[in-house]
Image (cartoon, rainbow, N blue to C red):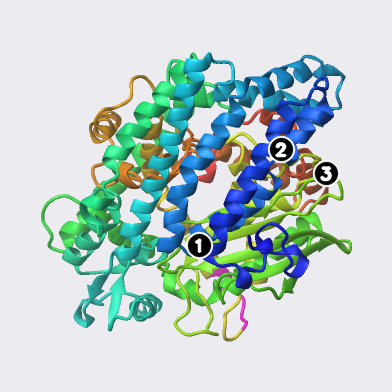
Amino acid sequence: MNPQLTRWTGPEGLPRFDLIRDTDFAPAFDRALAAAEAAHEAIAANPDAPDFANTIAAMEVADEDLNRVLSVFYTLAGVDSNDARQALQRDFAPRLAEYGSRISMDPRLYARVRAVAAAADALPPEDRRITELALRDLTRAGAGLDAAGRARMAEIRARLAVLTTQFTQNVLTDERDYVLPVADDALAGLPDWLVRAMRAAARERGLAGQVVTLNRSLIVPFLEHAQDRALRETAFRAWTARGSGSGAGGQATDNLPLVAEILALRHERAQLLGYADFASYKLETQMAATPDRVRDLLSQVWTAARARALSDQERLTAMLHEDGVNGPLEAWDWRLYAERHRARAHDFDADDVAPYLTLDAMLGAVFDLAHRLFGLEFQPLEAPLWAPDVRAWRITRDGALMAIFVGDYFARPSKRSGAWCSSLQVQHKIGDGQRPIVVNVCNFTPPDQPGDPAFLSRDDARTLFHEFGHATHHILSDVTWPSISGTSVAQDFVELPSQLYEHWLEQPAVLDAHARHHETGAVLPADLRDRMLAAGKAGAGFSTVEYLESALVDLAFHEGAPATDPMVRQAEVLDGLEAPDAIPMRHATPHFAHVFAGDSYAAGYYSYMWSEVMDADAFAAFAETGDIFDPATARRLEETILSKGGSAPADQLWIAFRGRMPGVDALLKGRGLA
């Protein structure tokens, strides 16, 4: 076994990615899994009476080596997939599910945890919290079922692990394999930076000319600017066909049978545990608590968003007809005409802003914001990572090491689409303790040539701020136990720090300091800045509707009896909403990875909006002081939320910060829908 997988020796304790080979993972996984099983067996078979130290605390460290192996493996599988890593994922998934089932449904462990929990009132608050969570998690895993129930639960978990892994790999295959060549005479309307990015994508694949791929940072601006309607339709249909069996991978990547089986198994799992359906099971531990509360929030916003979208649809349809195109506005038309309307209404051209929104400038902005709010300092760190353009930084405060931060920002064919924050290791205080190693991953369009600046769209810049908001949750974590560290919180609370961070991108003080022209260093002109900010709210109806469609379909999938034909259920929900025809779901079912690549966001895609209610109110706490960098408010945010992880229920953490629960008004105002 390669020792680099469990005892990292790179700078500041990073893994030596240059010394790790794909052939190292299987033996490392086998050994680490065996060690974890032995550690849990020792806890379960301990003849001593159960107490916090020999049961709960021991469980906190039992998976240490396994977690380190898997954190490296799954990081690489996400950012640089290949056939060997995909095969390993397919092998690891059912074995991990089987292991998880054995541990979480071991009646001996369950009895020991119950015994400790019975006396938990005498424990310190954090110890009591992880004891309560351990008992809750074992109960919800099925530890309290009879032998037949536990056996069936283990079968369900193993099968779900296989299905969700295959779902992910099918989408990745379609995204990786699809290219749409664009002839020179079809480049009309495309900005120069986009054409350069399309040519770079072609070169990366060994092709001549320029191509459109299914990378969001490439296809969305293509749909916003391409004048060739037939080409827009071709690109749009390919983008929305990912995982449907009609994309680049053909029938081999058809996710719909997988979705139907996933939904059926989740429903059976919930009913085994005594819940009416999966939504009731999942939401029990969230802030929302019930499907009705979720639907109430989403419905309040839907009415305003749909009205705005319908009004916009009339306006954009008229523009389509002015161009001599008869018939309705289609989904592949919306972005083009919305961009034209935005340019007319606000005298705004995104190309004018691009020279000011470089990746380096926006990184400077998020780092400066972290310094002004929380006193963090960033120093570049030279370290062997998985690609030449991946970067790392040491983060300190008052000279003390707080975290290591790694940023992987550019799209590559082998990288999973989207953007995310993960950790190679989390903060804890066990023994000598450890500081977090946090990873932000994005899929921005790389520069045309190495050394050239990378230009971000406004949406790209928002993504950068969002993911770094998640990173601060890890960086500022200050708890004892790894199971409640950083972002280990309720799913509908986890997006609060990330979405809160986005608010500062819209502040003139931040843009004036950091949005500088990449050649001249000139500040983004105030009138252009204000027009950009005003234009940013112009598409609120579209963006809110496409999100809510996905959130409401997700909820409907997991309420009541599972759909035998998911696409019929999807159509029923959208028809019931009377959604605008030209606005499809943000994530159609066959590639809805949030929901079907794992359980995290299943019956939980609503959580972005639930968190948005809070992030709007949280930013208002700063604004109310007259200083958006108010030190006292930032300190309270850190002390009550960012440092606390999951050490208390989310509603308690929120009230400790704000003093009351939030309402939906700030959200509607922030989206321009009030």
Q: Are marks 2 and 1 in contact (CB under 8 Å)?
A: no
- The three-letter amino acid code for the residue at tag 1 is Val
**Location of residue 138 with respect to 452 vertically, above or below:** above
Relative horizontal placement of residue 28, taking residue 602 as reference (left or right): right
Q: Cα distance, mark 2 to mark 1?
A: 31 Å
Instruction: Rate crowding at label 3 as few (under 14), some (14 to 19) or many (20 or more) other CA atoms within 10 Å.
Output: some
Which mark identifies residue 39? 2
Question: Could you tell me if residue 417 is visible in this image?
Answer: no
Which mark identifies residue 79? 1
Which is closer to the viewer, label 2 or label 1?
2
Q: Which residue is mark 3?
A: 430
- The front one of 18 and 535 is 18
Which is closer to the viewer, label 1 or label 3?
3
Q: Could you say whether the residue bearing mark 1 is in a helix, strand or loop? A: helix
- The front one of 122 and 305 is 122
Relative horizontal placement of residue 536, taking residue 311 as reference (left or right): right
Question: Could you tell me if residue 151 is visible in this image?
Answer: yes
Instruction: Rate crowding at label 2 as few (under 14), some (14 to 19) or many (20 or more) other CA atoms within 10 Å.
Output: some
Q: Residue at x 62, y 82 (%)?
A: 521
| Chain part drawn in magenta | 521-527
Q: Are marks 2 and 3 in contact (CB under 8 Å)?
A: no
Q: Which mark is first along the chain, 1 or 2?
A: 2
- The three-letter amino acid code for the residue at tag 3 is Ile
